[in-house]
Amino acid sequence: MKAPRERLAPLVDQARALVRMPPAPLPVAEELTAKRIEHALVLLAYAITATGETKFAPMLEYLERELAAYRAAPDPIDRARAILERHTESLSK
């Protein structure tokens, strides 16, 4: 059986590459969801605990903030309705 560091080496390499690269736009088929952010958090938490590398902590904090922001964001349909309501009110003044 491989040591934890050997098993995680490809994951750590991918994480390092992601930190260096600017985020690419998401393809339409891979929409950002809370589930995807949570999955990334689990993978990163596993990598951090298995390797003991604390240098990935900023990435963990970033994903935690993104998940909180995603959950706090109003629904796009509700935002669109609010825009239309404000526009209608401005026309009636």
Image: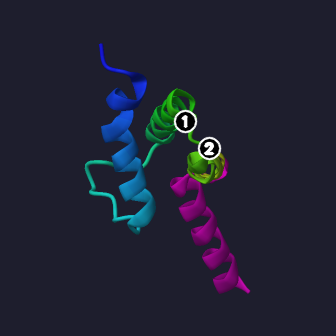
> Residue 74: x and y, percent?
62, 53
Q: Earlier in the sequence, mark 2 or mark 1?
A: 1
In what quadrant of the picture does the C terminus appear? bottom right
Q: Quadrant of residue 88?
A: bottom right
50 vs 87, nearest the viewer: 50
The residues tagged by marks 2 and 1 sit, at their Cα atoms, a distance apart of 7 Å
At label 2, the amino acid type is Thr
In what quadrant of the picture does the N terminus appear? top left
| Above or below, comparing residue 5 to residue 77 in the picture | above
38 vs 4, nearest the viewer: 4
Can residue 63 be seen here? The reply is no
| Above or below, comparing residue 85 to residue 42 in the picture | below
At label 1, the amino acid type is Ile
Magenta stretch, residue numbers: 70-93
> Residue 52: x and y, percent?
57, 34
Q: Quadrant of residue 5?
A: top left
Q: Residue at x 43, y 39 (%)?
A: 36
Q: Secondary structure at mark 1?
A: helix
Task: From the viewer's perspective, tell me whether residue 65 is left or right of residue 24.
Answer: right
Residue 92 lies in the magenta stretch: yes
> Residue 31: x and y, percent?
36, 49
For the residues bearing labels 2 and 1, Cβ distance under 8 angstroms = yes
* Colouring convention used in this rendered image of the protein: rainbow
| Residue at the disc numbered 2 | 54
Query: Residue 56, which numbered label?
Result: none
Can residue 82 be seen here? The reply is yes
| Residue at the disc numbered 1 | 48
> Residue 80: x and y, percent?
54, 63
Q: Secondary structure at mark 2?
A: helix
**Count of all numbered marks drawn on residues in the image:** 2
